[in-house]
Image (cartoon, helix red, strand yellow):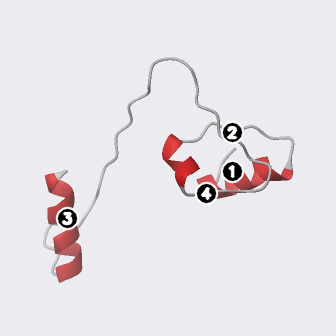
């Protein structure tokens, strides 16, 4: 199922679909008839990447870049 994760959960809500989504989605997206169940087995580790302009000048963007480098 392609598309944004909320759209995937909406399709499940409409019936006839099952989806595997990140656990964090269950904390913030709720649709009628959708039940989140944990999968058994070893956890899957994922990574995220951030791309930004080398010489960014916007103060808010620079602050966000600095913040994410600390994580």
Of callouts 1 and 3, the N-terminal one: 1
Mark 3 to mark 4: distance in Å?
27 Å
Disc 4 residue crowd, few under 14, some 14–19, many 20+, Cα 10 Å: few
Q: Do residues under tags 4 and 1 come within 8 Å of each other at their CB atoms?
A: no
Mark 2 to mark 1: distance in Å?
7 Å
Q: Kindly state the secondary structure of the residue where label 3 is placed.
A: helix
Q: Give me the residue at 77% from left, 47% from top.
A: 12
Circle number at residue 65: 3
Q: Position of residue 3 (x, y in %)?
A: 64, 54
Residue 35 sits above or below residue 9 on the image: above
Of callouts 4 and 1, the N-terminal one: 1
Circle number at residue 29: 4
Mark 4 to mark 1: distance in Å?
11 Å
Of callouts 3 and 2, the N-terminal one: 2
- Judging by the rendered image, the residue that carries numbered circle 1 is 8
Q: Kindly state the secondary structure of the residue where label 4 is placed.
A: loop
Quarter of the figure with residue 45: top left
Circle number at residue 19: 2
- In-image side of 4 versus 17 (left or right): left
Quarter of the figure with residue 21: top right
Of callouts 2 and 1, the N-terminal one: 1
Which numbered mark, 3 or 4, is in the foreground of this view?
A: 4
Q: Do residues under tags 2 and 1 come within 8 Å of each other at their CB atoms?
A: yes
Of callouts 3 and 4, the N-terminal one: 4
Q: Kindly state the secondary structure of the residue where label 1 is placed.
A: helix
Q: Give me the residue at 29% from left, 55% from top.
A: 50
Q: Position of residue 41 (x, y in %)?
A: 51, 17
Residue 29 sits above or below residue 41 on the image: below
Of 22 and 58, the residue lying toward us: 22
Q: Do residues under tags 2 and 4 come within 8 Å of each other at their CB atoms?
A: no
Mark 1 to mark 3: distance in Å?
30 Å
């Amino acid at each position: 199922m392609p598309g944004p994760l909320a759209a995937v959960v909406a399709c499940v809500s409409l019936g006839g679909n099952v989806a595997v989504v990140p656990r964090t989605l269950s904390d913030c997206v709720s649709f009628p008839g959708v039940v989140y169940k944990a999968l058994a087995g070893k956890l899957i580790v994922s990574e995220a990447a951030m791309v930004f302009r080398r010489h960014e000048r916007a103060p808010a963007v620079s602050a966000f870049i600095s913040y994410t480098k600390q994580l």
